[in-house]
Amino acid sequence: MQCPCGSGKTYSECCELIIKKERPALTAEELMRSRYTAYTINDVDYIAGTTHPDKKNDLDIEATKKWAAESDWMGLSIIRTEKGTTNDDEGEVEFIASFSIKGVKQEHHEISTFKKTDGEWYFWDGKYPTAKPFVRLEDKTGRNAPCICGSGKKYKKCCGKEA
């Protein structure tokens, strides 16, 4: 069976080892992937156990169990990671978890922060990414500028003419 985390490995050689505590997550991304997999198998004890001790009061166990059980998990996409290597004590993983509830497809897009305490990675916090401002790469064509088609007319009288 392929691992639900999308690593391309089998479950037994990937997240199962971490979830069953046969080996620790070596990176923040590994912990993120194993936590996603734990949601897919509704192992909320693992989710709670990998939440940083200082943040456990923020976790609603019953709501998490309900959400995990009602969801049909469809895949995990890692957008980016920042730090979170074996040599770091903090890391960040941006991801999109796809799932459906009662046939309605949804995506959970989050930037998760992880912290290492006593050599073990823990989930610290999650936040939604903020929208990035639009940046124009080319100059805007002004209404009174020559038309970009090369007709010699003003843009507003040619290609920029409102219908």
Image: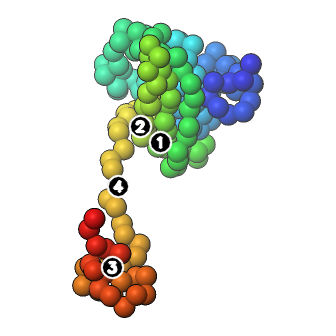
Q: Categorize mark 3 by other alpha carbons within 10 Å: few (<14), some (14-19), many (20+).
A: some
**Amino acid found under the numbered disc labelled 2:** Glu
Label 1 or label 4, whichever comes before in sequence order: 1
Q: Amino acid at mark 3?
A: Cys
What x and y, as percent, mark residue 128? 35, 39
SS assignment at label 4: loop
Q: Is residue 98 above or below residue 136?
A: above
Quadrant the N terminus occupies: top right
Q: Is residue 88 above or below residue 154?
A: above
Disc 2 and disc 1 in contact, CB within 8 angstroms? yes
State if disc 3 and disc 1 touch (CB < 8 Å).
no
Of badges 3 and 2, nearer the viewer stands 3
Compare marks 2 and 1 and give the one earlier in the sequence: 1
Q: Earlier in the sequence, mark 1 or mark 3?
A: 1
What residue is disc 2 on? 110
Q: Earlier in the sequence, mark 4 or mark 3?
A: 4
Q: Nearer the viewer, mark 4 or mark 3?
A: 3
Residue drawn where x is 67% and y is 34% of the image:
7
State the separation of the CA atoms marked 1 and 3. Answer: 45 Å
Residue at image coords 38%, 34% = 126
Of the residues tagged 4 and 2, which is closer to the observer? 4
What residue lies at 72% left-to-right and 33% top-to-bottom? 8
Q: Nearer the viewer, residue 76 or 81?
A: 76
Q: Secondary structure at mark 2?
A: strand
Mark 4 sits on what residue? 132
According to the picture, the residue beneath numbered tag 1 turns out to be 94
- Mark 1 lies on a secondary structure that is strand
The residue to which callout 3 is attached is 158
